[in-house]
Image (tube, rainbow, N blue to C red):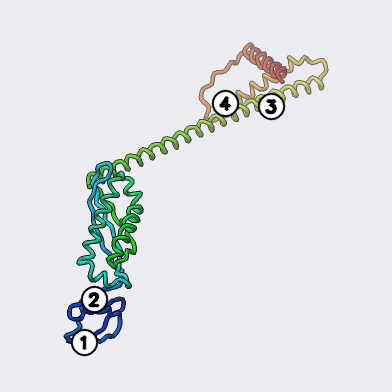
Amino acid sequence: MSLIYTVKQQNCAIIERFGKYHRIAKSGLHFKIPIVDRISTKLSLKIKQLNVSVETKTKDNVFVNLVVAVQYRVLADKVYEACYMLQDPKQQINAFVFDLVRAQVPLLDLDDVFSKKDDIAIAVKNELEGQMAEFGYGIIKALVTDVNPDANVKAAMNEINTAQRLRIAATEKGETEKIMKVKQAEAEADAAILQGKGIAGQRQAIIEGLSDSVEEFVKQIPGTDPARVMDMVMMIQYIDTLKEIGGNSKSNVVFVPHSPGNVNDLSTQFRETIFSAQKLN
């Protein structure tokens, strides 16, 4: 029976006179005729959200539950339609979403439902916009917020994903071990080559040093037989070697030829080696 009434911001009120639509009162202070006018209903112009849960089947026969969030609001220029054309707008939106999702998802495999959920949301929004606009409602956005397959299917998908990751990890580990073994083999080969070159160089230096010693001795004492000089040098080397072996605290028992005949044989072999090396150079 009040004469004065107010309408809050982002709201509107439907005023009826004698039970018939009279006007729309927007936010602010208003007056009405007691008994003649009455506030039929108040509508909010704010954006609302409706979450719709839809269970359906995919193309590969997997049952899945989708949650679609629809954001909507009353259109300011169609308040009359929103008030008088729909009894329950939420139920109407719910029915449209069910119909659209159950038309889209059966065309997709389960993996595609996850990857193309944005496409499903866009299709829902576009279809709802056209259907709900004539009833005074605008669709702001539609989102597929959740995709839940059956628990057994979800467990199987997790097992498949785990197996794939383990296979990739095993492959990477095998490749790593292979690379390490190849690099180790290459390093050992390079070390053996360098060691061989070092030994060859050492022997070459010994040979050149002995040759220079023999030549210098022959120059200092003319008429001396080089073979005799070589035998004498070999004898000195032989004695120095025995001395070095005997002076090493870590040496064990070493058996070496010690008779003059054996020493002569050693000198002959060493001399032949020197001559062969000189021919190769």
Q: Residue furthest right?
A: 222
Whether the residues at callouts 3 and 1 have beta carbons within 8 Å, the answer is no
Q: Residue at x 63, y 11 (%)?
A: 261
At label 2, which amino acid type do we have? Lys
Q: Quadrant of residue 7?
A: bottom left
Task: Answer with left or right where residue 279 lies relative to residue 63.
Answer: right
- Horizontally, is 25 left or right of 259 in the view? left
Spatial CA distance of label 1 from label 2 is 18 Å
Measure how far apart labels 3 and 1 are at the Cα level. Answer: 127 Å
Residue depth check, mark 3 versus mark 2: number of the one nearer the observer:
2
Tag nearer the camera, 3 or 4: 3
Residue under label 2, please give it: 42
Q: Locate the N terminus and report the quarter of the image it occupies.
A: bottom left
| Chain-order first, disc 4 or disc 2 | 2
Residue, disc 3: 205
SS of the residue under disc 3: helix
- Residue 33 bears which disc, if any? 1
User: The disc labelled 4 sits on which kind of residue?
Assistant: Gly
Q: Residue furthest bottom?
A: 3
Quadrant of the frame with the C terminus: top right
Mark 1 and mark 2 in contact? Answer it, CB < 8 Å.
no
Per the image, the residue denoted by label 4 is 246
- Give the residue type at disc 1: Ile
Residue occupying the far top of the picture: 261
Q: Nearer the observer, disc 3 or disc 1?
A: 1
